[in-house]
Image (tube, rainbow, N blue to C red):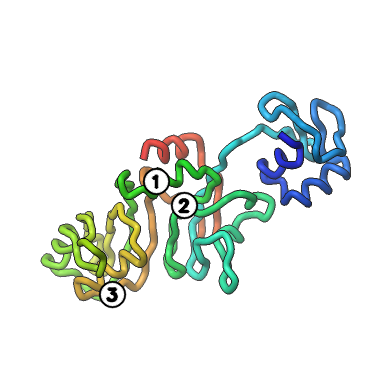
Amino acid sequence: MRLDKFLCEMNKGSRSQVKDHIRQGFVTVNGAVIKTPEQKIKEDSDLVTFRGEPLTFQKFVYYMLNKPQGVVSATKDNTARTVLELLPEEKRTGLFPVGRLDKDTEGLLLITNDGQLAHRLLSPKKHVDKVYLVGIKKALTVEEADRLRQGVDIGEKKLTAPAKVEILEELQIALTIHEGQFHQVKRMFKAVGNEVLTLKRIRFGRLQLDEKLSPGQSRELTEEEVELLHES
């Protein structure tokens, strides 16, 4: 692998930025300062340091973001701030959000460069659960909750799949679904004559939102959390 590509993969900046770092002598390979960005290295065995920091090659990276309201789940947007802009600039290269949360929805969003895992997590055939805390306008009746559990008509070709509905408080529901239709949760509650006022995702597959993360904050997943995602 080219040295500049390696540094990009390690989220040390854009291609132009890492080329400048290399030419300024900030990078060593096996103890020798290398100033040529096109230098080939063996990423699995060569010892590369950046500003004295040893770099261990990671093919895939995984971040948990507590998405705040007002940002869009995209890599680029012409009008709104994106979730990638909440990560440090040097860590954004090649990353993308897994699925999307509405602009006004908060909570757990996975950001990675692992396309295969993202595809499996989002595949309708895999039935990966997503759990939301839903603040609603008025209390659900028993009949309305049962309709959500059985599946409702939101204007698609078929009813929504059966959901798990847990009433936490009079106006707060824990809703578990495994589909990902556009504005699905809002449309489900509208179908039973209610309105969603607040929406926060707290679990995706077996990955639980770290409540220590304030809205807008992120961190890398632990090895155990990555394993949980693969098991999902």
Q: What residue is rendered at 67% in x and 55% in y?
A: 89
Residue 147, image quadrant: bottom left
The picture places residue 26, in percent across and down from the top left corner, at 84, 41
Mark with earlier residue (3, 2): 2
Q: In the rendered image, which quarter contains the C terminus? A: top left
Q: Which mark is residue 196?
A: none
Task: Residue under label 1, please give it.
Answer: 121
Q: To which residue does mark 3 refer?
A: 195
Number of the front mark, 3 or 2: 2
- Mark 2 or mark 1, which has the lower sequence index? 2
Q: Residue at x 38, y 58 (%)?
A: 201
Dot 3, how many residues are within 10 Å of its Cα: few (below 14), some (14-19), or many (20+)? some
Q: Residues within 10 Å of mark 1 (few under 14, many from 20)?
A: many
* Element assignment for label 2: loop
Horizontally, is 35 left or right of 232 in the view? right
Kind of residue sitting beneath label 1: Leu
Q: Residue at x 30, y 52 (%)?
A: 178
The residue where tag 2 is placed is 98
Single out the mark in the foreground, 3 or 1.
1
Indicate left or right for 25 with 187 as reference.
right
- Pointer 2 with pointer 1, Cβ within 8 A: yes
Vertical relation: 97 (above or below) 145: above
Task: Please tell me which residue is depicted at 33% across the width and 54% down the height of the picture.
Answer: 131
Residue type beneath disc 2? Val
Query: In the rendered structure, which amino acid carries the disc numbered 3?
Result: Glu
Tell me how far mark 3 sits from mark 1, CA to CA.
28 Å
